[in-house]
Amino acid sequence: MRGIQNHRGLRLKYDDDGLGLQSEAIRTVALHLLRHGATQLEVMTGLDLLGPVAIDEDTDLLRSIALLQGDYGYAAAMMLSTCSHPGRSLHWLAVRSSPTDQTTYTDALGKLATKDAEALLEELGTAASMELLRMMSFRSRTPTWMKGNRRLAVALALAAKQPDLFGQDLPRLVAITQVRDDLLYGHSAFLDLTPKLRAAIARDLLAALKTSRAGALIAAALARDPHDGEAIWLHRYIERADDEDGDFPPGLAIRIAVPAPSTGEEPRTHLLADGVPVVTDLFGNGVPDRPERLLHQKQGLRTRTEPYEVRLAEADCAEGCCGALVAHVSTDEAGRRVLWEVKATHGGTDSTRFAFDADAYDAEVERAVADRSWEWSAHRAARLLDQRLRDDPELLARWDCRLAGAVSWSSDRTLLKLLLWHPEPPNRDRPWLQFQHQVRMPDTVVIDDDAVAAAVEALLERLRTTDPTSFAAVCGGSREHAETLGHPWPPSR
């Protein structure tokens, strides 16, 4: 196929009655467009036409077109899902796709009928099965065919004993952590595994990360680049991990997991009831909330004198679109048990109830709140800066500014961002702008708390003496508001 020119969004429209052509004629036109089309309009029209009349012999052509990714990949994937052996084609595409496009195929794989998924698993070796588990771990919803799956459980137990099946380089070590976290907190927790075997596999995977060869790989990466974010993360993951991580106690267990920087995913607060991950089990639209929100915002998960509601997870799109998972938290009359009633805000009224020993619950929540070992330097600095500015709102108010927040995102762990509103948060009656000031802080294996404190104090001192709108960059609002308030609007906007 010749190079495709992009005319995004252009699609052929025709009546529901079709084009008035026989199926074979439609196939002829569709295949001609797919093999010779030079624009997106031609190729997408070919896919639209072929969809209702596709047959198994079109599989190779559809897979080739899907490799163009984007809209082509999505359209082709939907068609391949209706062909024979859909798992084979979707898996073939998933392992050949970039991370951003891979979700197109893993989403389709997750929706496979159990018989089609089993047909795929029969063809996959142990190593390929582990890569499938790793890819599927990024989906929010647990595939039906994974629940109680014996074949994957056996493959996982075997791979944990033979970690070379994952490979022998740094990315493969990251893959082991992803499979291990999925076993502890994600979809793999619902494979055909007893709690004892699940914990044993988790220990074996951790042992694979603690071998001298794995340590040498990480050390060599850090020697080449002391600021290698992935190597730093791996080192800290192994340091934080515990051999007993899979031996969940009865009642509530709270575990904070930090995905690899390369995933761009934020830290997650996993809540386990008798070892079962609550969010993964009850909510298929999103992942557990960040610890900043779930544990540290207001009173977090702490028990209170009055019942309250707390959000455990938000939909991947937005809470206003596909809802959230919330828990109504209360205590019984004797104060001996903490009661949760958990339900999704969209999609029905069913709820799941949990009861936890109050003393054990309180102790676990306080332990999790006090655990800051998961933070990186810029994140710790952002937390301390945010708290200092909230404790002393006049520091910014003197410049007619309001705090929007201080953050450090996982995708760039060397960056602290201070976000400010001026003169106030978005208001229909007054012009407003948002400003952003960035501070670079090196990511390190061991956090230097003195250096973190010094960076925070330096920025606070600057805010005491200098109007932040003079050195921070405009990052939100409108050109009209910027002109009214006398600030330059960023050229790229």
Image (tube, rainbow, N blue to C red):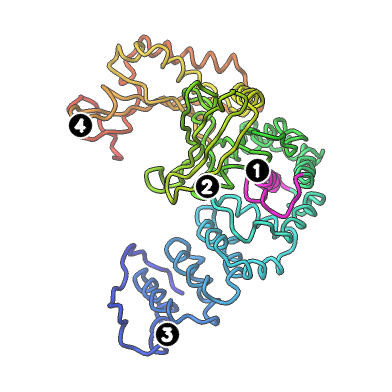
| Tag shown at residue 428 | 4
Q: Residue at x 42, y 63 (%)?
A: 71
| Tag shown at residue 283 | 2
Label 3, on which residue? 27
Find out whether residue 192 is within the magenta segment. yes
Question: Between disc 3 and disc 4, whose residue precedes?
Answer: 3
- Residue 109 sits above or below residue 249 on the image: below
| Mark 3 and mark 4 residues within 8 Å of each other at the beta carbon | no
Could you classify mark 3 by the number of other residues whose Cα lies within 10 Å: few (under 14), some (14-19), or many (20 or more)? many
Question: Between disc 1 and disc 2, whose residue precedes?
Answer: 1
- Residue 343 sits above or below residue 90 on the image: above
Residue 358 drawn at (x, y percent): 62, 25
The CA span between labels 2 and 3 is 41 Å
Question: Between disc 2 and disc 3, whose residue precedes?
Answer: 3
- Looking at the rendered structure, the kind of residue marked 1 is Val
Q: Which residue is drawn at 40% across and 13% down?
A: 462
Q: Residue at x 71, y 65 (%)?
A: 124
Could you classify mark 1 by the number of other residues whose Cα lies within 10 Å: few (under 14), some (14-19), or many (20 or more)? many
Question: Between disc 2 and disc 4, whose residue precedes?
Answer: 2
| Tag shown at residue 327 | none
